[in-house]
Image (cartoon, rainbow, N blue to C red):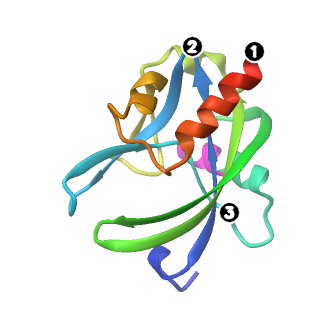
Amino acid sequence: MSKNWHEFTRPVALCLFTNNGRLLAAKGKDSVKQTEFYRPIGGMIEFGEYGSDALSREVMEETGQKIKNIKYIGTLENIFTYEGKSGHEIVLMYDAEFEDESLYEKECIDIVEVDWCKAYWVNIEDCTSGKITIYPDGIVELLEKLKGNEA
């Protein structure tokens, strides 16, 4: 792809992996804003690829792990600024499970695509209360929707 991520609206598939009141999210930093944030794992949907297939591929690329029971939850539109550049994403949000259940017992999971990045099991209450910043906007409402479906 010849354009940079900030030069077009990009389609993205992310997953709300949840377990015992926790959400798996990669920790990021914006050096321009001097802020820390979290974002669920996943990534860009390639041309001709279904969102659920992109999610499986991205999770495999990022963690080396297979997933199952993929369920579409909703779509978010994310207009943002990161590292001083504007971005625009259409985000397909999914729920899924790791095939390897031992991952739910770990404190964090290495993101193999990026040496400095890890995904942590963060407390969902910290997300909903604003104690930690989670992107894209609208995730808190989707987590509430997921919680309602479990009842």
Closest to the observer: 52 or 132?
132
As helix, strand or loop, the secondary structure at mark 2 comes to loop
As helix, strand or loop, the secondary structure at mark 1 comes to loop
Choose the circle earlier in sequence order: 2 or 1: 2
Q: CA distance from mark 1 to mark 3?
A: 31 Å
Main secondary-structure element of the magenta-colored stretch: helix
Residue at 56% across, 18% down: 104
Q: Which residue ends up furthest to the bottom in the rendered image? A: 2
Residue 33 percent coordinates (x, y): 22, 59
Q: CA distance from mark 3 to mark 2?
A: 29 Å
Q: Amino acid at mark 2?
A: Asn
Q: Closer to the observer: label 1 or label 3? A: 1
Residue 129 percent coordinates (x, y): 39, 29
Residue at 52% across, 70% down: 88
Choose the circle earlier in sequence order: 1 or 3: 3
Residue bounds of the magenta highlight: 58-63
Residue 75 percent coordinates (x, y): 69, 54
Choose the circle earlier in sequence order: 3 or 2: 2
Residue 23 percent coordinates (x, y): 52, 28
Q: Is residue 62 magenta?
A: yes
- Residue that badge 1 annotates: 151
Closest to the observer: 71 or 62?
71
Q: Amino acid at mark 3?
A: Ile
Q: Which mark is residue 20?
A: 2
Question: Is residue 63 in view?
Answer: no
Considering only vertical position in the picture, is 86 above or below 75? Answer: below
Question: Is residue 52 in view?
Answer: yes
Q: Closer to the observer: label 2 or label 1? A: 1
